[in-house]
Amino acid sequence: MKRLVSMLMVVALLMCVFPVLGEPTNSNQLSDPRVRKALTYAIDMQAIIDGLMQGKATEAITMAPPGDWRADDLTAYEYDPDKAIALLQEANWDSNRVLDVVYYYGDQMTVDLLTAIQAYWEMVGVKMEMRKLEGDLASQLWVPPSDPLNGPSAVDWDLAYAAVAALSMGDYYDRYQGGYSSNSYNPQDDKLDALIAATNATADVDEQIKAYHDLERYENEIQVNIPLYHQPVFIVQSNRLDRGDAPYGNEQYIYNWDIVNWDIEPDANGKKVLLTNGGPMEFFETPFFNPGFLMSQKVLFDRLIIADENLTPKYPGLASEFSLSEDGLTFEFTLRDGIKWHDGDDITTDDVIGSIELATKAVTNPVLLTTFKAIEGYEDYASGAAESMSGITVDGNKVTIKFANINPNVLLTFTQFAPLPMKYFKDVDPLLLQQADYWQSPVGSGPFKVKEVKMGEYATFERFEDYYGGQAKIEEIRMYPSGESDANLAKNAAAGQVDYAYTKSVEDVIALEQMDHLKVTTVDVRYTRLFYVNKFPQK
Amino acid sequence: MLSYIIRRLLTMIPMLLVICFLIFVGMELMPTDPISYMVGPEQIANMTPEKLEEMREALGLNRPFIVRFFEWLGGIARGDFGYSLTNGQPIKDIIAAKLPATIELSLYALLISTVFGVFLGILSAVKRGSTTDSALTVLGMVGISIPEFFFGLVMILVFAINLKWLPIGGRTLPEYTSYWQQFRHVIMPATILGISMTAGVMRYSRSSMLDALNRDFLKTARAKGLPKWRIYILHGFRVALTPVVVLIGFRLPTLVGGSVVVEQIFQWPGIGDAFVTAVRGNNYPLVMMIALLTVTMMLAASLIVDVLTALIDPRVRLE
């Protein structure tokens, strides 16, 4: 009897902590998983992909794209309007409610896609209106409520059409935690939080994969948000360019693309010049926030470790040796002897450590920042109580970094993190790092160095003669200015001004594929478009 | 005339202040945000509210709008044009780098539109009612009606992509050693910009010339048996020139601000392109400086046109 009572108490406690699946958790009907599933069932995403995107995307059933990191027993909520109607009826959906759907992209594809979804939802009796957000996006999209469990919502939208370009799997899911700084949509869910915590509790890759599979199953079961499609990256190269055996990977980040061994047909002057985009418009972008969005960030800066095309840390870079302890709490690396910055000065351990410290105070990619914040002594350093992080020690060229807690992305971080020559940042406010003069003509450590910059017109790069990986076969790289999204790509490619570039624009790819002198390679990456569903009670 | 010029220069100061204030208010009302522009919409979700707030504070965006306006104004009065919010570079350096490109483009466009516009306008007036006049009228309407971006894209398709005669865009390339190599880059954008203005100048010149041709002194010249070219060029054109000079004078400053579309299509690194980028990012110190420059040029052009009109036409007196 005593045992039965205690079992009943546990069940009662669990019911309090974990709301029964399939029921709303608060007054907002969107907190009901049945409604979110109905909204998913109502969209024929494959038809949209085939029609609007000419098949150049993959339907998403969870945030994680297909591959080892995605569980293979997930439910695909395939188009089924009857099921959607039944679920909405079961959930007593208020047919007078008009969903407020917001977006921030300025392209026609977004409007077409949302218009199609509007029509699909209309067919099952769900009304929606869409509006484009302008201005301060963070304050309109990502303000968490003061009470992360009960709300009310601090934002005024129902669904937000957005994307996640994930460097690590944690980029997809950490933001779902209750009380997370940008979580404006998910009320605290202890089970979800526990599953996310499990993914971050180990440095062992196999265990991480297992933890993510568990997390995805729960995500899929309650349909936390509405994943729509995975967008690949399209790599464009001209028939002048020979990438040799270099693999094709996620061009948005840094991997072993081996540009030193790329070769290109000489131009009319007999010079091997690679033409590309990603040149600076107003400044060279720091590699701290977006490590490799732009070509300049890739060729100017080297990293301590080199990842393979799947972004798995594998090869030595600026570090000749590296290791991570079994418990994941100690990372050691040895800086190569005799490596130099483009100005001829030695690259030192002080530069590497100073760059880590600078990154903790600057605008830095969250994967990198989370790793650095886990270093022993970070709190004291950040508060000003200590001049450096006690967890970092140096012995000659060997650097040891001890972590206060496990971070699953230590090695990944050092495949993307670019040390900078610290002598140029002595009087720079870390928060205004991007505004430093250095970014008008940076001195880096990569296989190419800046030769000439006409800001907003072109930038040229020449081979770095002291590069530890040998001299590149290509003599010069010429970049015309563009951001990550290059409006002039198709036009310039048609005129023969592009030997290499990458894009995620379907419209561009359709045009580029028709050009005989170009080859387009499709690479699946961690890039997912979705609807964030605001499940908090409305204001 | 000198006192008139000084008086006009003095009246420009309050006008500039009011216009600058209105532009500053407009910037404040615009739904754009420098931080969202710099960080990017997808990445901004990864930043903590505290970090965003620290960045706003560091960039001085949290201070009241009126304080920022008077700080900017004070800087201008001291000759300090400020710094770009996005790249931290002195605005005087940005303008010094961008303005020559726009002036180069504008001057060529002005030259094209003036030469063709005046010539075709006079031809149209002289051949009034003929097939030539009708054809030029239709061409003028076409020139005004077709948008610059369409003309631009057609020219790129024909001359840069298919025929490969001209470069697709940009202003220069690293290997160029002389201006004439660079000149190929300005041909298409200047032609597009020039064509869009030629029609206006042509119609204006035609009306002005027709008006002049109906004057009594020209009838007298004809009666005296003077050669036609002499009547048209030396007597008629000189009189017709005054309103045309006014039009052309006012075109130059509008070209500086009005070449935005052409600069974007042809990747021309001018002030128009910089202006659009700055407006998108609410980079108000740069927007204000470019706006101030354009307004000053407009007011200066107005003064110069008045002075020129007085010099060309003895009937005009400046008081």
Image: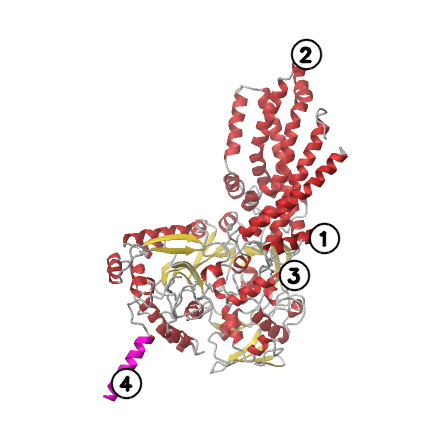
Q: Disc 1 and disc 4: Cα gap in Å?
A: 79 Å
Residue density around tag 1, few if under 14, some if 14–19, many if 20 or more, within 10 Å: few
Q: Are marks 2 and 4 on the same chain?
A: no
Q: Give the residue number, with chain letter if any, for mark 1.
A: B78
User: Does residue B146 appear left or right of residue A475 in this picture?
Assistant: left
Which amino acid does the dot numbered 1 rest on? Arg
Which numbered disc, 2 or 1, marks the residue closer to the eye?
1
Q: Chain of mark 1?
A: B
Q: Give the residue number, with chain letter if any, for mark 3.
A: A437
**Secondary structure under badge 1?**
loop
Q: Main secondary structure of the magenta part?
A: helix
User: Does residue A253 appear left or right of residue B299 in this picture?
Assistant: left
Which amino acid does the dot numbered 2 rest on? Gly
Q: Disc 2 and disc 1: Cα gap in Å?
A: 64 Å
Q: Is residue A74 highlighted in magenta?
A: no
x 52%, y 25%: residue: B135
Which numbered disc, 4 or 3, marks the residue closer to the eye?
4
Q: Give the residue number, with chain letter if any, for mark 2.
A: B225
**Secondary structure under badge 3?**
helix
Q: Position of residue A291 (x, y in %)?
A: 53, 65
